[in-house]
Image: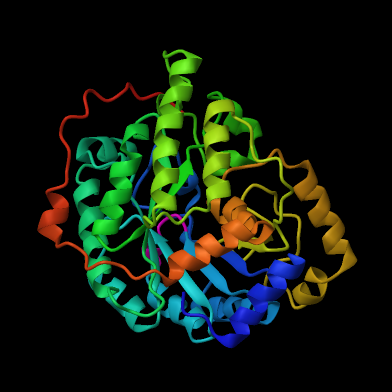
């Protein structure tokens, strides 16, 4: 992360007060070229509702004034937006650190190169398995694994040795890949990436989406959950083996982006279904902007605040009215395991989380392996895939 003095000051103020919104997620689109089993956001894609490039310029300007340091552009699939590169430049030219979250599939790599030319130093790419058939099954797209790995190796080489670069693999931990986590961390290091492990969140039943706002993002896919035919004790042992291994790897210096507090909370969540008990900093340390520019304190909450581009938004954001609404929303939320929220809180609530993240951002990357060697890491001994469920 290439930080200016201004941004260091903002981070210090956030660490002391937890009242500076240093992180923002901008879902530039809900459109996506994949229909991943655990994600439902692609069902809400509508290009007509998305902000224009001129409006995105104003979003970037307003984020800069509010004190944001890190912006993640996600989706959907951000590269579905034809002006993504210019949108990225709107943030980087204002000194904001930008990360683009992409699936890396069906991607013209020349567009990636333009983003890098415009100052993007961080990409997150989804990769949930080293078994191509398993990953293709999750993404519901044949050839997704190979396409993602080709994009990963391209970015790894393009950003190797670049100051502030931190490309990251995002891995959703589920019943399908629990035993692969250490090998995925090794793969990430070898291609010049860090890796972030996110425990899967699923709807509890097929009808939950009718009444659950969160159903915009997650789906009913019990075959991916850890409530399998195994005994609770066996499931607990599987989770403990996986998380003991990656926690030790993190301690040994492997490029695992998650903080130790977040990894421990993830273990507890997968074993018990309980979200972290610590308070939520949504709307203070971080917030979310929808494709149409609507502000929410996080993905889970309904849209009840002023539009981010409303002329009165900045006054509203610093008002007592906003803080009352924010406290009510955060205080009544059942919780989540979204790393962009929970891990950001862990980084600013604990010295351990803060220094672990800082150390990783300063840690040099080894020279990444080439695309042929990366593709040769494919596994083909994963056994039969589970039967898919509707939802």
Of residues 185 and 302, which is closer to you in this image?
185
Furthest residue toward front: 252
- Residue 266 forms part of the magenta stretch: no
Which residue is located at x 37 percent, y 71 percent? 82
| Position in image of residue 370 (x %, y %) | 14, 62
Q: Quadrant of residue 344?
A: bottom right
- Residue 79 forms part of the magenta stretch: yes
Q: Is residue 28 visible?
A: no
Q: How many marks?
A: 0
Compared with 11, 167 (above or below) is: above
Compared with 289, 343 (above or below) is: above
| Position in image of residue 84 (x %, y %) | 41, 72
Compared with 139, 186 (above or below) is: below
Which residue is located at x 60 percent, y 80 percent? 7
Q: Is residue 162 visible?
A: yes
| Position in image of residue 141 (x %, y %) | 26, 42
Of residues 341 and 113, which is closer to you in this image?
341
Horizontal side of 31 relative to 268 (left or right) equals left
Furthest residue toward right: 320
| Position in image of residue 74 (x %, y %) | 47, 60
Compared with 284, 299 (above or below) is: above
Which residue is located at x 87 percent, y 57 percent? 324
Which color scheme is applied?
A: rainbow
Horizontal side of 74 relative to 24 (left or right) equals left
Q: Quadrant of residue 364?
A: bottom left
Q: Which residues are magenta?
A: 75-81
Of residues 67 and 244, which is closer to you in this image?
244
Which residue is located at x 58 percent, y 40 percent? 265
Horizontal side of 65 relative to 87 (left or right) equals right
């Amino acid at each position: 992360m290439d930080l200016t003095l201004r941004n260091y000051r903002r981070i210090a103020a956030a660490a002391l007060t937890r009242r500076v919104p240093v992180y923002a997620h901008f879902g530039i689109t809900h459109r996506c070229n994949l229909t991943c089993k655990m994600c439902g956001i692609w069902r809400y894609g509508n290009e007509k509702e998305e902000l224009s490039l001129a409006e995105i310029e104003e979003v970037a300007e307003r984020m800069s004034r509010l004190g944001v340091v890190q912006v993640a552009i996600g989706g959907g699939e951000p590269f579905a937006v034809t002006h993504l590169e210019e949108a990225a430049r709107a943030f980087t030219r204002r000194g904001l650190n930008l990360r683009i979250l992409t699936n890396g599939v069906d991607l013209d790599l020349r567009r990636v190169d333009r983003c890098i030319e415009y100052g993007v130093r961080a990409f997150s790419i989804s990769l949930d398995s080293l078994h191509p058939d398993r990953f293709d099954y999750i993404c519901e797209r044949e050839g997704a694994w190979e396409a993602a790995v080709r994009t990963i190796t391209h970015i790894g080489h393009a950003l190797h040795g670049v100051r502030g670069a931190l490309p990251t693999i995002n891995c959703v931990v589920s019943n399908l890949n629990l035993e692969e986590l250490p090998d995925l961390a090794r793969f990430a290091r070898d291609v010049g990436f860090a890796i972030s492990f996110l425990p899967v969140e699923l709807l509890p039943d097929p009808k939950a989406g009718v009444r659950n706002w969160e159903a915009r993002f997650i789906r009913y896919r019990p075959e991916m959950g850890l409530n399998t035919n195994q005994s609770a004790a066996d499931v607990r042992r599987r989770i403990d083996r996986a998380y003991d291994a990656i926690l030790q790897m993190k301690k040994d210096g492997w490029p695992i982006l998650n903080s130790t507090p977040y990894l421990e909370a993830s273990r507890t969540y997968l074993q018990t279904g309980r979200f972290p008990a610590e308070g939520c900093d949504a709307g203070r340390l971080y917030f979310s902007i929808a494709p149409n520019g609507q502000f929410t304190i996080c993905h889970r909450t309904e849209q009840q605040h002023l539009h981010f581009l409303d002329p009165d938004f900045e006054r509203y954001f610093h008002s007592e009215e906003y803080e009352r609404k924010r406290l009510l929303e955060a205080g009544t939320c059942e919780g989540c395991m979204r790393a962009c929220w929970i891990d950001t809180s862990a980084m600013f609530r604990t010295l351990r989380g803060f220094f672990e993240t800082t150390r990783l951002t300063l840690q040099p990357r080894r020279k990444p392996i080439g695309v042929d060697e990366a593709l040769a890491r494919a596994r083909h001994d994963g056994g039969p895939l589970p039967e898919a469920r509707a939802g």
